[in-house]
Amino acid sequence: MMSMDHQIASIRMAGALSKSTDVMKAMSALVRVPEIQQTMMALSKEMTKAGIMEELMQDTFESLEDESLDEEADETLDAILFEVTKGEMGKVGPVVDKAIEPVSFTTFLKETKFC
């Protein structure tokens, strides 16, 4: 009795393996593994390149954020403005940064006497 159960189990296992083999053959026909492998390798290379480029760009932008460059640019701009305005910019006092309140167009025209 035990050997009959064993033989039935073996036959069922053989049938399942046969079906599994058929499925694997069908998948192999549908999916071309070498082509997918090449595509994945190319994608991996491109992603690596993109990662390296991103790191280089971040490093470049970080090096551009140098505070001394901003100060040098401000000094150069001040010198150019002083030269272009023939020294008049030096006479102007400090600029006060005030918030501008919104005004309607008609109010603006009335205040500037365009109406």
Image: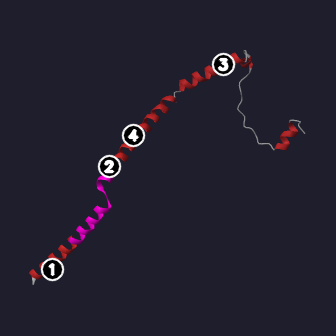
Residue carrying label 1 = 8
Alpha-carbon span between mark 1 and mark 4: 57 Å
Task: Say whether residue 109 is magenta.
Answer: no
Q: Give the range drawn in magenta.
A: 18-40
Residue carrying label 4 = 49
Q: Are marks 2 and 3 in contact (CB under 8 Å)?
A: no
Q: How many marks?
A: 4
The residue positioned farthest toward the bottom in the image shown: 1
| SS of the residue under disc 2 | helix
Sequence-earlier tag: 1 or 4: 1
| SS of the residue under disc 3 | helix
Residue at left 15%, top 80%?
8
| SS of the residue under disc 4 | helix
Alpha-carbon span between mark 3 and mark 1: 97 Å
Q: Looking at the rendering, which quadrant does residue 11 occupy?
A: bottom left
Name the quadrant of the N terminus. bottom left
Above/below status of 82 relative to 35: above
User: Which one is nearer the viewer's eye here, 95 or 42?
Assistant: 42
The kind of residue on which mark 1 rests is Ile
Sequence-earlier tag: 3 or 4: 4
Sequence-earlier tag: 4 or 2: 2
Q: Do the residues labelled 3 and 1 touch (CB within 8 Å)?
A: no
